[in-house]
Amino acid sequence: MAVTLNCAAMGSGNAASIKTLHKFTGHPDGADPVGPLINVGWMLYGTTKLGGKSRRGSVFKTDLATNTTAVIYSFRKQDDGHYPVAGLINVNGSLFGVTTKGGTSDCGTIFKIDPTTATETDVFDFDGEDGIFPYASLTKVGGTLYGTASEGGTGNAQGTVFKFDPTTGVLVVLHSFQGYADGILPYSKLIKVGGSLFGTTYGGGGAGGVCNAFGCGTIFKVDLSTGTEEIVYSFKGSNDSSFPTTGMIYLSGLLYGTSYGGGTNGNGTVFQFNPVTGAERVVYSFNGGADGEYPIAALTDVGDTLFGTTIGGGADNVGTIFQLNPETGAESVVDSFKGPDQREPYGALIKVGNHLYGTTSGQAAGKSRSKAGSVFKLKLQP
């Protein structure tokens, strides 16, 4: 049965609303959390792109029993990586993540953190041919981690798909994107469906067209047994989707994702993709304004209802939380962010108990580190 917010309550003075649990302050706290949260034993763990003791990013935890947030690690400088924009993944009690910069070649790193001791270890440094600037969270399949780097690789060097063995520290590039028809800028987290990994690229899918000279973006898959990559759909922009920036989720045999652009009004979409037939359709086109615009984060499935966020639109034009019926395409705004700390949610929502949790970046507030983002929650009603 679908879980939705209590519409009657929303129309009264008891409306469900976003509650800020923590306001980041920059230094020595974190700043600009843009990756999704994960739940490990009723502790939420996440990263901030900036802030921390050295202003190069941090790892933090939010205790759901007390609703308190604390930084457990601050990235220092190039040797241990900096600017972590992706979320974390739990591998046998250790938290693995990526930094967009840092490492021996300043191309980014893979790191792990012991959440008990707050000890951080740089386990891999990207060097260019194996990728540059990883943005997406890692995906665990068996004992192997899979991910994407937004640039770099061999040949035309437009990004990579890689696999990483957390035991041996060995990384293998499965595919280097060659641009245009092959895809450009894979920002997305990967998802396993059957024997393949599916993801999106921000650009590519053909030269020219209605988006730009580099295409509107693609959906691709990588065969786990052979490592071969295939573009399975190219977005078309107008009246379709364009510029997907995040991974997809799997629901009832179909993949669902968001695109920053495209749709009827060019304000972004929620789209559906059938991994068996290759058919794609726009489930919802954002109008801009009250219903939100520019969805950046991945979707969250709550009882067959899709929840997501936009970084624009809503009551104060700084973003919304919305819910969507994936079958009918009916969309409604659950609540609007109200700034200056509650603005621009880049990371996906996570459901724990009867609440949704997430972060806002606070980026549009300018350089002030007193407006550096937040951790928030929203109560769900049966």
Image (tube, rainbow, N blue to C red):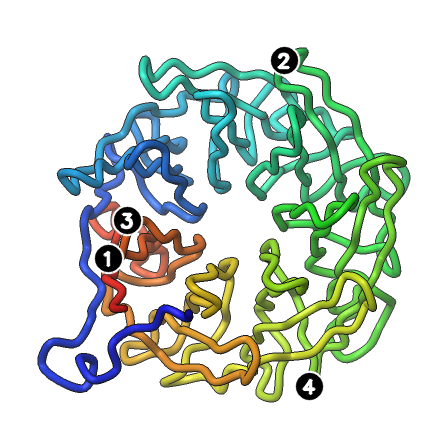
Query: Residue shown at 34%/17% (left/top)?
Result: 118
Q: Secondary structure under badge 1?
A: loop
| Alpha carbon distance from label 1 to label 2 | 40 Å
Residue type, label 4: Asn
Judge from the rendering whether residue 337 lies leftward or rightward of residue 101; answer left or right: left
| Alpha carbon distance from label 3 to label 2 | 36 Å
| Alpha carbon distance from label 1 to label 4 | 34 Å
Query: Residue shown at 87%/52% (left/top)?
Result: 230
Q: Is residue 319 at all visible to an observer of this figure?
A: no
Q: Is residue 286 above or below residue 251?
A: below
Q: Is residue 38 at all visible to an observer of this figure?
A: yes
Residue type, label 3: Ala
- In which quadrant is the C terminus drawn? bottom left
Which residue position holds label 2?
167
Q: How many numbered marks appear?
A: 4
Q: Is residue 319 above or below residue 19?
A: below
Which residue position holds label 4?
239
Which numbered marker is on residue 333?
A: none
Which numbered marker is on residue 341?
A: 1
The one nearer the camera, 323 or 242, is 323
Judge from the rendering whether residue 329 lies leftward or rightward of residue 234; answer left or right: left
The one nearer the camera, 42 or 82, is 42
Q: Are marks 1 and 2 in contact (CB under 8 Å)?
A: no
